[in-house]
Amino acid sequence: MRVEGPPFPGLARGLWVMGLGLAAIAMANNMIIPLLGPVGRTVGLSDQHIGLVHSGAALAAIPAAPWWGRRSDLVGRRPVFVASLLGFAASTFALAWVLQYALWEPLSAGTVFALLLMSRLAYGALGSGALPAAAGYLADVSRPEDRLRAMTMPSRAFSLGGLFGLCLVWPAAALFGYAGPVFLVAGFGAMVAVASLFLIGTAPHRREGRGLPDASRQRLPAPYLLLAVNGLAFTLMSMIQTTVPFFVQDALALSTSEAISLATGLALVLTLATLAALRAAAASKLGAPSLAALGLGIAAAGAAFLHLSSGLAVLGLAHVLLGFGLGLFVPTTQSALSLRTSSATQARAAGRLSAAATSGYVLGPFAGAFLYADHGARLYLFAMAALAGLAVLLWIRR
């Protein structure tokens, strides 16, 4: 990735430490998805309660992410990134403590639900500023023609962090209990936050104006369309991801530990496929809207295979398609929005896109839990049809 103007001291280490911070967030989130369902059932929570806990983080992040983005444009990338990462570490530690205490001591389901929900609300409010700050930093230092490649960095960090986090679930849970992996990643996030104070430098002066000439910019979808499609796509993806642990446990009659292991393995497959798609997106000559439409179409095929799954091979193929589609979709929409945004408000735009995507994690887990309870695997047919419709819409408007 090329930078605007000559390189400045600390650019490389600033990018690295921001990548580590985003990876820590992904590690925690990817651990919680396979752990919370089976462990929540063990401590007495219903599937609906678990879906609401998943939604809590997203509910708080919807207003918080744009606010953090505005603060980043005003006061700088580093203070917002550090403050948000510290908030993520504290709220994640609180979630791990509640889970561990509930496994040690019998608590009412209502008490466990309330404490878990509060910890996720705190995470959404405090931890949602890291991505807008990082996206603003990348926009500051990248040329317009390199924007798509630059915007794959947050997705690569999230994917690699998620991959490492999922690999950590098995040994850490065996050594320290089900909440052990979450405790570890909370501590890692706190250490990265402290390091960020010293390692993230100040980006070069940002030029005013938008990223592309007017004639080129008109070929990009309008910002409102990008925001709307992101919100709907992530609603559907979160419905799928948060119900897979229930689906595999029920369909294959698995125990709690077996369901956690299989759901974690499938999440690993999805993450590896996402990383492969990110490399393809960075090297592709297709325009961002075309790549985004292609990604949604591939994800729709993954949802169809998930509904048809009759064994581990088909489950694995479904997650390959879901992950590859997600890896094409996310950085291309981030790049397109960045190029439609003035250079003085890059983090604000990134915060809005983050809020739009995060809104999917409010409705998605809640709706997915209820739809799964009533209709089982048929909810994946609905997700397939909706993802395919969004792909057609983006293809028409590309």
Image (spheres, helix red, strand yellow):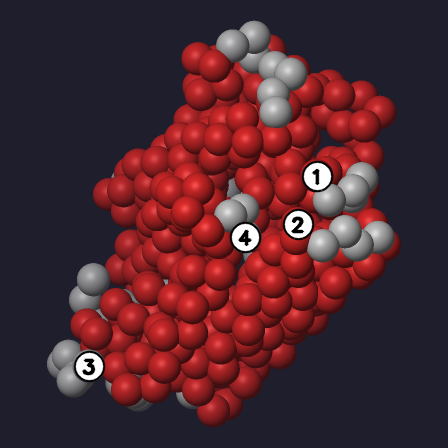
In the image, residue 116 sits, relative to residue 298, either above or below, namely below
Q: Which mark is residue 179?
A: 4
SS class of the residue under badge 4?
loop
Q: Earlier in the sequence, mark 3 or mark 4?
A: 3
For the residues bearing labels 4 and 2, Cβ distance under 8 angstroms? yes
Front-lying residue, 186 or 335: 186
Q: Name the residue beneath numbered marker 2.
A: 103
Q: Name the residue beneath numbered marker 3.
A: 10
Q: Name the residue beneath numbered marker 1.
A: 42
x, y (%) of residue 212? 37, 65
| Residue 75 in view here | yes
Residue type at mark 4 is: Ala
Which residue lies at the image location 77% right of the left edge and 51% below the top edge? 106
Residue type at mark 2 is: Leu
For the residues bearing labels 2 and 1, Cβ distance under 8 angstroms? yes
SS class of the residue under badge 1?
helix
Residue type at mark 3 is: Gly
Q: Earlier in the sequence, mark 2 or mark 1?
A: 1
Q: How many marks?
A: 4
Dot 4 crowding, Cα within 10 Å, few <14, some 14–19, many 20+:
many
The residues bearing labels 4 and 2 have C-alpha atoms spaced at a distance of: 9 Å
For the residues bearing labels 4 and 1, Cβ distance under 8 angstroms? no
Mark 4, mark 2: which one is toward the viewer?
Answer: 2
Left or right of 70, for residue 208: left
Front-lying residue, 345 or 131: 131
Dot 3 crowding, Cα within 10 Å, few <14, some 14–19, many 20+:
some
Q: Hey, which quadrant is residue 290 in on the image?
A: top left
